[in-house]
Amino acid sequence: MTNEVAQTKGNYLTDLQKLDGATLRSFVDPKHQASPQELQTLLAIVKNRNLNPFTREVYFIKYGNNPAQIVVSKDAFMKRAEQNPNYDGFESGVIYEDEKGELKNKKGIILPKGAKLIGGWCEVYRKDRTRPIYREVELSAYNTGKNWWQKAPGQMIEKVAIVAAVRDTFSEDVGGLYTSDEMEQAAPVDVTLNETREDVVARKMARIEQFNKEQEVIHPEPELVEEAIQGELLDSELEY
């Protein structure tokens, strides 16, 4: 019996096509936070793209009751690129604004003195194309100001640029897949209301008053629309 278990385990570790949903969930989602549909989506990506969840090539990011985000590691992107026979290397770096306000590209992430980091860039080469794929990404679109984005923003934005360029260059291998660095800035925000009913009414009445003042410019008789507007705005706000 022990040999059978070991053989079965070895099967899916060496052949991801033999991986089943229950085994996948026990490894990537032991708390059962993901829905069956989300789990099946991950399993399909694992098998179709041959991404190994046991080496963290692909995994879930789950925020409360929000839909699970399936993300792929940068190493997995590079591995797929290097496995493609047409891969011919890449160059990358950062985009910065110099003291004169001019935008410049440079290889690597170390900035000149007085420069302001603006973004990252990457150029990927394929042997079967005459021109490289070039992509730029803007720092402000991805920078969360947390963790490594605070410590090493140049390194992080260059990594995002590399992934974006590799994805567009080898869409047949990694198209439609994203890393956690790309998904992090889209993390759901807690929008739970902390106001009392009285607070909501007071805030909405203030908005109604402001709305009516604005309507005086448009409507010669704002009292004709005031009652309808008040009812509509209050009803929409209090039904929470």
Image: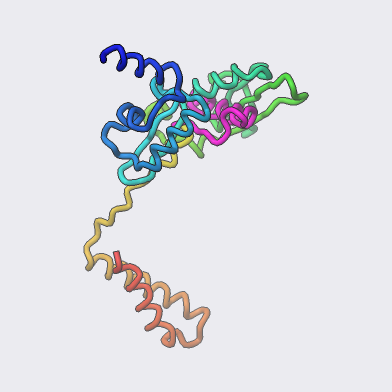
Quarter of the image for residue 125 reads top right
In percent of the image, x 26 and y 13: which residue is there? 2
Q: Quadrant of the N terminus?
A: top left
Residue 40 percent across, percent down from the top left = 41, 38
Q: Quadrant of the C terminus?
A: bottom left
In percent of the image, x 33 and y 27: which residue is there? 23
Residue 131 percent across, percent down from the top left = 75, 26
154 relative to 68, above or below: above
Can the viewer see residue 25?
yes
In percent of the image, x 59 and y 22: which residue is there? 93
Q: Is residue 131 left or right of residue 61?
A: right
Colour logic: rainbow
Residue 114 percent across, percent down from the top left = 54, 26
53 relative to 239, above or below: above
Quarter of the image for residue 79 reads top right
The magenta stretch is 152-180
- Front-most of residues 23 and 84: 23
